[in-house]
Amino acid sequence: MIRVLEDSQDSLGDSELEDVVSSVFRPGGWLEKVLEFDYRAEQEEMAQAVCRSLIVGENLLFEAGTGVGKSLAYLVPSILFSRSRKRPCVIATNTISLQEQLLDKDVPALRLLLDGISGLSKWSDFRCALLVGRANYLCTNRLNQAMRGQSDLFEGGQREELRRIAEWAGSGAGEGIRQELSPVPPAVVWDAVNADSSVCSSKRCSPETCFYRKARAGVDKADLVIVNHSLLFSLMGAGFGPEEDEDGVIFSNDFVVFDEAHEMPDVASEHLGLSLSSWAIEMSIRKIYNPRKRKGLLAKSGRPSDLDAVEDAELAVSDFFHHLHVNSLGKKDRVRLLEKGTLPLELFPPLSKLCRCLVEVAEGTEDESLRLELKDQAKRLQGYLNSLSEIVDLKDEKSVYWLERTGKKNQIIHLRSAPLDISEVLRERLFSRQASVVMTSATLTRKGKAESFKTMVGLEAVREGIVNSPFDYRSNMHIRILGDCPEPSEQNRSPYQHYLAEAIHACSSAIQGGTLALFTNYADLRHCFQCLRPRWDKLGRSIYAQGEGFSRTELRKRLLEEGDALLLGAESFWKGFDAKGPSLSQLIITRLPFENPGHPLMEAKTEVLRKEGKSSFMELFLPSAVIRFRQGMGRLIRSRTDVGELVILDSRILRKRYGRSFLNELPKKDYEVFTSDEAFQLPE
């Protein structure tokens, strides 16, 4: 019997809230009646667990397998609790695809559901907002300012981009977010018109004219705020949030749901540390003044001494990063910093002098917009100096510091830091804020226990729950393991790479549908792509590879449209990649996904564990690899009707003692072992 609520109710008591959630998810409940969704016992169990945790004010760790319907299981109790208690709900996701799913599919479904429930129809107008970093938004004030001064700030091609942005803004521009423009504008142009500036302020901009102010106003009034992990942890690291005497994480009295929660430790480590790049500093200085093109903020207002200060700073920055490139990094792409004062200090005086010059020019100009831009740049340079000072002196004993090269040509140098133990930071800044934190994912446990994850994030008091996927893996998935694949040699990887290419070709060309092959490094991926491309051309079938001309979104689109393509992916393709149907009929895992033990952060963590008499392999590398392995396997079966073949090419899963940890996580316990003689002809 489904209880009908009074239309006049503005809030629900604890027992009423539990009753309504139960009436939505139970057999024959509102979810079936209104949306015609199938009943799923696992979804009902999760929804009730989320509801209880919010009412009691506890943290919840809930693993729910693929196909459970996690989004609605936390959205329904969360929005009912939010509206009833007048508390904002923050939903944090790690991938754009899940964010889009929530906004385009799940939130509209939730509105339809509430609208169809007697007594709750008026709650269907709950306010939902997407929160992204302010640098992603267009500021019309800055755009107008850039248009007026474009001859001083931009060259020919950049002025064309500026006009394209202006046309886009004039035509409505959607939410005014950079990613809505295709192609995305160059950073040097967008940096001059985005909302990450003092020019974009509540005093100068309004929700009626500024995209960021409009979005910010929507967030402030929202019942449900959707954000990504990166921004949430960046805001936490910057000290953004309620006052110390208030409850809440990001907003006063809020509560947070982390979907894709298995990513929390890595994302938190990345965004609660420092990151400083040669590209960022060089671009900032060029924006102030580019002597070769005579353009920039100081083009008209700068004194000769100011322009000299810019040139001195530019030369010092160039010398500094050249030193890091040649002397500190040498032939390595990543180097850990272990001793204080090993980096050159000549960069500090020129940058400090340029900061003073910018402040002086700003104070002397009558142009308010220019004054704010100059002060912003001075503040940014001072931030660079502060970060450089911390990195040079290795100021935080609880952090790890390193240098690394990035970019297509490996020309960008980053100075990075990360907390050595993210659990201490999260325990203080997240779990001690007296706000319920719900964490869910398909992969939070190992052998049914979440101890590794809880240790990594600093969880102590937490309610736990696990439900398996409702999919029939026994009938719909076939698992094969290659039993004689050699281990790659550190000195000569060619034989292994040839073997790998042959194995992938034999497995993927033998099926009619599409194949996704997951790699743990780009060298193997590129070798296989170059080796197999001519052969797949002869087959009249397409082969695609990550990093070879198409975005992840475009690669997914092509895989779905063609139905029989081979896609080679690494890193991001292990998680959040969703392709239902025969277009993904086979998943190949080339290697067990162990992290690089040479990464500075992993090195430092290994040293700590060694001092404690613990094994870094058992405590750190194996649990992480198992979680990633489970994420990779999860790409294959994405619906009740999906069928497919899982192929594992790493024979260590059979030969090594730790292989049992991976075998235990297979969705079904029976698998077939095959050899190269049975499957393909080895190259001569």
Image (cartoon, rainbow, N blue to C red):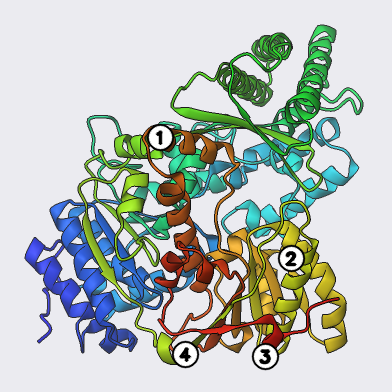
Q: Which residue is mark 4?
A: 476
Badge nearest the viewer, 2 or 4: 2
Badge nearest the viewer, 4 or 1: 4
Spot occupied by residue 255 in the image (x, y as percentages of width and height): 28, 50
The mark nearer the N terminus, 3 or 1, is 1
Residue 95 in view: yes
Query: Alpha-carbon distance for marks 2 and 1?
Result: 49 Å
Label 2 neighbour load within 10 Å: few <14, some 14-19, many 20+: some
Q: Which mark is residue 511?
A: 3
The mark nearer the N terminus, 3 or 4, is 4
Secondary structure under the numbered disc 3 in the rendered image: loop
Secondary structure under the numbered disc 4 in the rendered image: helix
Spot occupied by residue 679 in the image (x, y as percentages of width and height): 69, 86
Does 321 sit left or right of 400 as displayed? Answer: right
**Amino acid type assigned to the residue bearing label 1 in the image:** Phe
In this rendering, the answer to whether 132 lies above or below 13 is above
Query: Alpha-carbon distance for marks 3 and 4?
Result: 15 Å
Does 298 sit left or right of 223 as displayed? Answer: right
Query: Alpha-carbon distance for marks 4 and 1?
Result: 47 Å
Q: Which residue is mark 2?
A: 496
Q: Which mark is residue 240?
A: 1
Label 1 neighbour load within 10 Å: few <14, some 14-19, many 20+: some
Q: Name the residue rendered at 30%, 53% in the picture.
A: 451
The N terminus - image quarter: bottom left
In this rendering, the answer to whether 283 lies above or below 20 is above
